[in-house]
Image (tube, helix red, strand yellow):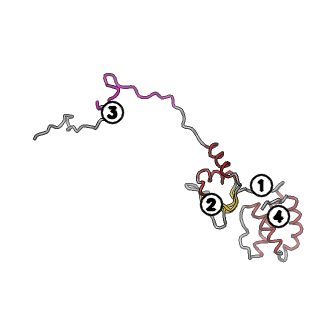
Amino acid sequence: MVDILTIDAVREQLEAIKPRHATSFTGADKKFIDRVYRRLFNKEVVNKGCNSCYKDAFVEIYCQIKKLKELPDMSAYRLKNGVVYTEPFTNHSYVGEVKDEDAERILAKYPAMIKKFARYPEDWEARCNKEAKGKRTRKPKTDAEPPKPVEGQDPQEDEQGQAQGAEPTETDAEGAKPQDNE
């Protein structure tokens, strides 16, 4: 479903239903309020069976529309009903509409999460791959040189004088190898 609401259409409709604010809204009014409220605030009307909740939502919409020059764009991503996604190691939680950049960042890390989305663009994989490529960081180049061998030491021996890769030998407290007394 493509949402083609314009700011002027919303203002016009709000003025048309404004007189019913004092009494009660019709079913069509409530659908309109639901749709605009979700679009503006990215959340649902608190209690769908409560007329006062719709009146409160109407007032919030009315005040917000006065400030706006245009309606915010709808996200291409929407989580399924009942799905709450909380990003690991952060305080970010998502319900319902998820901003495109947030959804693409999440899906770039966890592609299996696509099953939790009710709405997403057909090219979501390409978008997420582009997002992942843009965020990759390279290891910083270091100008440090590898350690030089100590004078008089074979470069194939480590600091204890053992050949690299050789098994360490047992020594006693004075550094002498124990003798077999058979």
Q: Estimate the spatial distance between the alpha carbons at disc 3 and disc 2, rounded to whole Å.
A: 51 Å
Q: CA distance from mark 4 to mark 3?
A: 76 Å
Position of the N terminus, as image quadrant, is bottom right
Rendering coords of residue 76 (x, y %) = 72, 56
Mark 4 or 2: in front is: 2
User: Residue 99: which quarter of the image?
Assistant: bottom right
Position in image of residue 140 (x %, y %):
54, 35
Foreground: disc 3 or disc 2: 2
Q: Which is nearer the N-term, disc 2 or disc 1?
A: 1
Q: Around disc 4, counting alpha carbons within 10 Å, would you say few (fewer than 14), some (14 to 19), or many (20 or more)? A: some
Query: Which residue is disc 1 drawn over?
Result: 73
Q: Quadrant of residue 85?
A: bottom right
Task: Judge left or right: residue 133 versus residue 178.
Answer: right
Secondary-structure class at tag 4? helix
Q: Earlier in the sequence, mark 1 or mark 4?
A: 4
Residue located 48% across and 29% down the image? 144
Q: Secondary structure at mark 2?
A: helix
Which residue does the numbered mark 2 point to in the structure image?
115
Mark 4, residue position: 62
Q: Which residue is mark 3?
A: 164
State which tag comes first along the sequence, 4 or 2. 4
What distance separates the C-alpha of mark 4 from that of mark 2?
36 Å
Q: Which residues are magenta?
A: 142-162
